[in-house]
Image (tube, helix red, strand yellow):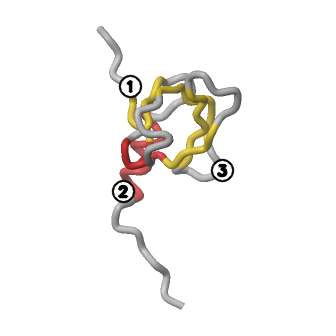
Amino acid sequence: MRRSTNRNLPKSADLFVIKEELMTGRRIVVAASAGPRLSGRIGIIVGQGATATQVKVLLDGAKRFVTLHARYVDLLKTRS
């Protein structure tokens, strides 16, 4: 059986860079591509997900974390 490939995912070398940026404690904003329910929500990364491309995020005002793919998470720009 032929394996399907998703061309929207970053290459494996890029995944390592993404994972290095998405460390515990970093503030994030959920990307618009995550859908209307989650897009624009702000939160904090609380840990790694089950795979190398997932992160656990506690959204502001939520009681429990959600697990999101790294492509749906953007780092929040800090005010310097």
Marks 3 and 2 sit apart, C-alpha to C-alpha, by 18 Å
The residue beneath circle 2 is 10
Residue 27 spot, x, y in % from top left? 47, 23
Determine whether the residue tagged by mark 2 lies in a helix, strand or loop: loop
Closer to the N terminus: mark 3 or mark 2?
Answer: 2
Count residues near mark 2 (Cα–Cα under 10 Å), then give few for <14, some for 14-19, many for 20+.
some
- Furthest residue toward top: 80
The residue beneath circle 3 is 50
Q: Quadrant of the C terminus?
A: top left
- Furthest residue toward left: 80
**Disc assigned to residue 45:** none
Q: Report the residue at 44% width, 48% height from top.
A: 35
Asked whether disc 3 touches disc 2, contact meaning CB atoms under 8 Å apart, the reply is no
**Disc assigned to residue 76:** 1
Q: Nearer the viewer, mark 2 or mark 1?
A: 1
Left or right: 59 as drawn, with respect to 15: right
Q: Report the residue at 61% width, 44% height from top.
A: 67
Closer to the N terminus: mark 2 or mark 1?
Answer: 2
The residue type indicated by label 2 comes to Pro
Determine whether the residue tagged by mark 1 lies in a helix, strand or loop: loop
Determine whether the residue tagged by mark 3 lies in a helix, strand or loop: loop
Q: Nearer the viewer, mark 1 or mark 3?
A: 1
Residue situated in front as seen by the camera: 65 or 51:
65
Count residues near mark 1 (Cα–Cα under 10 Å), then give few for <14, some for 14-19, many for 20+.
some
Residue situated in front as seen by the camera: 16 or 1:
1
